[in-house]
Amino acid sequence: MIYTSKSFPVSYGMKLREHLIIGGIAMIILTPHWGLWRAFLFWGAEVLIDADHYWDYLWRSRFQDWSGWRMFKYYNLITQHLHDKNFFAISILHTAEIFIGIYLLAYYWNYTFFMTIFWGMMFHLVLDIIWLLKYKVFFVRAYSIIEYWVRKRSLLRRGLNPDGFYKKMFELSK
């Protein structure tokens, strides 16, 4: 089933603008408690976690297409398939393994710096989860690299190729 912009929001999860605004409001609220530098770090982590979407686009283009506009078009095309039962995605910086790594960096190296990044990323993930639950697509995202490998293997065993889907969406976004 294809969802149009009238029946489904035209973005892959929350839009960048929404993260910038909501994260900015959180930064303003945190500034009196944490100071400007730490609040700004929180906001930066909350926004920059989405760099993995751009990295995914670069990877799928074999680093041949650096267009941010086509990357947004690519994800808008993907959004039309969020309710397809065989569709799922991974956003590397949104996975449990990355969060654990950031937490361990905080524990072993620089607690304040990395915990601020950790909470900025966690704030972002909570906003994404709220969006995914609202549109009933919570399970469209793999929340772990291990989960992604298991689900991908399951699709491949059933004769479905998730990489083929992404390749098709990439070609359509040109």
Image (cartoon, rainbow, N blue to C red):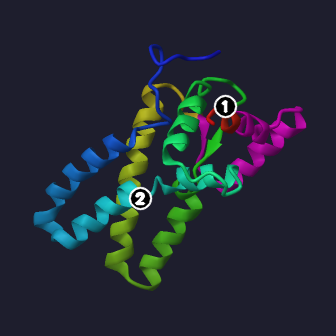
- In the image, what residue occupies the spot 50% across and 39% down? 72
Give the residues in magenta.
140-168
Q: Would residue 146 be counted in the magenta stretch?
A: yes
Q: Amino acid at mark 2?
A: Leu
Q: Is residue 144 magenta?
A: yes
Please tell me in which quadrant of the rendered image residue 165 appears.
top right
Q: Give whichever of 15, 69 is nearer the camera.
A: 69
Residue 157 appears at what percent x and percent y? 89, 38
Provide residue 12's location: percent of width, then percent of height: 50, 36
Principal SS element in the magenta part? helix
Q: Split into 4 quadrants, where in the image is the C terminus?
A: top right
Front residue (pair 84, 69): 69
- Judge from the rendering whether residue 40 lies leftward or rightward of residue 170; answer left or right: left
- Of the residues shown, which amino acid type is indicated by label 1? Leu
Query: Looking at the rendered structure, which numbered label has been put on residue 38?
Result: none
- SS for dot 2: helix
Residue at point 55% right, 41% down? 70
Q: Which residue is mark 2?
A: 48
Q: Is residue 19 above or below residue 108?
A: above
Q: Nearer the viewer, mark 1 or mark 2?
A: 1
**Precedes in sequence: disc 1 or disc 2:** 2
